[in-house]
Image (cartoon, rainbow, N blue to C red):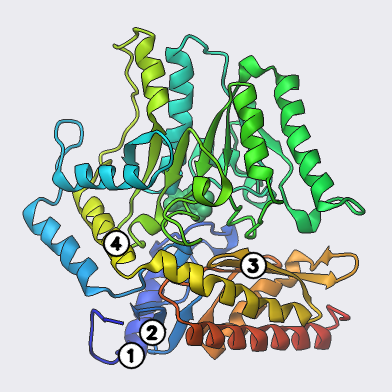
Amino acid sequence: MDSLNPMPPMAQTQAGGDALLDKARRHLIQPWPLVEALGTESRMLLSRSDGIYVYDEQGRRLIDGPAGMWCVQVGHGRPEMAQAIADQVLSLPYYSPWYTTTGPAAELAEKIASYAPGDLDFVFFTTGGSTAVDSALRLVQFYNNVRGRPEKKIIIARQGGYHGSTYLTATCSGKPRDKGLMDQASDIVRHLFAPYPYRRPEGMSVEAFCDFLVEELERTILELGPERVACFVAEPILASGGVIVPPEGYQRRMEAVCRKYDVLTIADEVVTGFGRLGEMFTSETLFGLKPDMITFAKGVTSGYIPLGGIVISRRLIEEMKATGNGAAMFANGYTYSSHPVACAAALKNIEIIERERLCEHVREVGPYFQARLQELAELPIVGEVRGMGLMACIECVSDRTSREPLALDQEVGRRIDRHCQELGLIVRPMGYLCVMSPPLIITRAQIDEMVSILRQGIERTQDDLRREGLWRG
Ligand SMILES: Cc1ncc(COP(=O)(O)O)c(C=O)c1O
């Protein structure tokens, strides 16, 4: 793998690292902080990265298990990415998308539309995943207003879903822990059950569970009144909810119910897009869907530069035009919409994904990754190992028969992550879940190394919990 810096990783001096951590503690607020951590917390200091690895301030090498945040598809430290970004900065770093167009934005819009299913031909660029989903939801509202249906406003989302951190997208997210003391736009959002086969009602088959979920959607639309229900927003696989893979046929059946009641569908492919499941977009190729919009972000630039966006059905645009209300303005957009440097980074990133056949690579190593991880299901603390492509989750339980989750305050995910970090791997802990989504360039040998460390990390955690009397497995 090529490397931006051919030198061996330089260790930060201890004093230099400490000074940076001190500055962070005193001035830097990072996402999802606890009140008690404000002004006192400093997170791991990283100094550089290369391929599937990141290096901490002592120069220690760690496998990047989550690919940053599901995003570093082509791996870290690619000189080509640096060059493409530098070239664009030197030729035209920025101009207002309100008045001008740039080459990279036009080229990227065409490229993304070419990968999108059906008549999803139009692309609107945002600054990340939250702004992509937020813009998609606002476009749904606008579309119904233009069409003279201002009462059609309710958004249906799901428990366990995650759609971002704006007021509206955070309301659509369905993770109770994130809701706590944050205000919500609850008047226009309803949540359905998570399509979570492992946590389905006791005694119910997966098929019956799927029927139940589809019926729940139809019942909800009918109870609210189809004339009031605007859209269904859903990740094809619920990523941050714990890589929840819905039952077979679920996505298609949910879409059919939406079509029946003229409810638009938004496939949130912020995580699943750009190769993570071996496809550029998964909606149609893997799940047989034809959504009205697809949202994307993360993997579109491999995280080198922030970018997100929506691919929008031509039909929606034509229906709005057909109203004759041409003077209506979709008053939504960002200073950094269509940012030329971000678009140039995305074009180079997609070129690398295509040239190195990374989707084919994921289709090849994905099943191996899943099979190797399945071996960890024999560990007594592991309730379920699940996933698809290069997305996976290990769910820990206090009892494998009752499937009782381990108490959150035991921080089992964090404990596993701590042990794994000592052994050279970062995992993403979430309560009693550990989530993994390595860079797409990962090899079989690196998967073996990852799984071996993970096994040791889980075994050490089991030993600690037993010793502390917190688990009797
Ligand atoms: C499915 C999904 N949608 C939206 C978002 C929000 O993206 P961002 O954090 O780039 O705003 C995320 C972030 O993890 C996500 O997983």
Answer whether residue 164 is visible to the viewer in this image: no
Tell which circle, 3 or 1, labels the residue nearer the N-terminal end.
1
Question: Vertically, is 235 above or below 135?
Answer: below
Q: CA distance from mark 4 to mark 3?
A: 26 Å
Report crowding for label 2: few under 14, some 14 to 19, many 20 or more residues within 10 A (C-alpha). Answer: many
Disc 3 residue type (three-letter): Cys
Disc 4 residue type (three-letter): Asn
The front one of 2 and 159 is: 2
Q: Are marks 3 and 2 in contact (CB under 8 Å)?
A: no
- Mark in the foreground, 4 or 3: 4
What residue is pinned by disc 1? 11
Q: Are marks 1 and 2 in contact (CB under 8 Å)?
A: yes
Tell which circle, 1 or 2, labels the residue nearer the N-terminal end.
1
Q: CA distance from mark 1 to mark 2?
A: 6 Å
Disc 1 residue type (three-letter): Ala
The front one of 12 and 201 is: 201
Q: Are marks 4 and 3 in contact (CB under 8 Å)?
A: no
Q: Secondary structure at mark 1?
A: loop
- Mark in the foreground, 2 or 4: 4
Tell which circle, 3 or 2, labels the residue nearer the N-terminal end.
2
The circle on residue 57 is 2
Q: Secondary structure at mark 3?
A: strand
Disc 2 residue type (three-letter): Glu
What residue is pinned by disc 4? 349
Mark 3 Cβ and ligand 1 under 8 Å apart: no
Report crowding for label 4: few under 14, some 14 to 19, many 20 or more residues within 10 A (C-alpha). Answer: many
The circle on residue 22 is none
The front one of 262 and 70 is: 262
User: Is residue 105 left or right of 207 when viewed as pictured?
Assistant: left
What residue is pinned by disc 3? 393
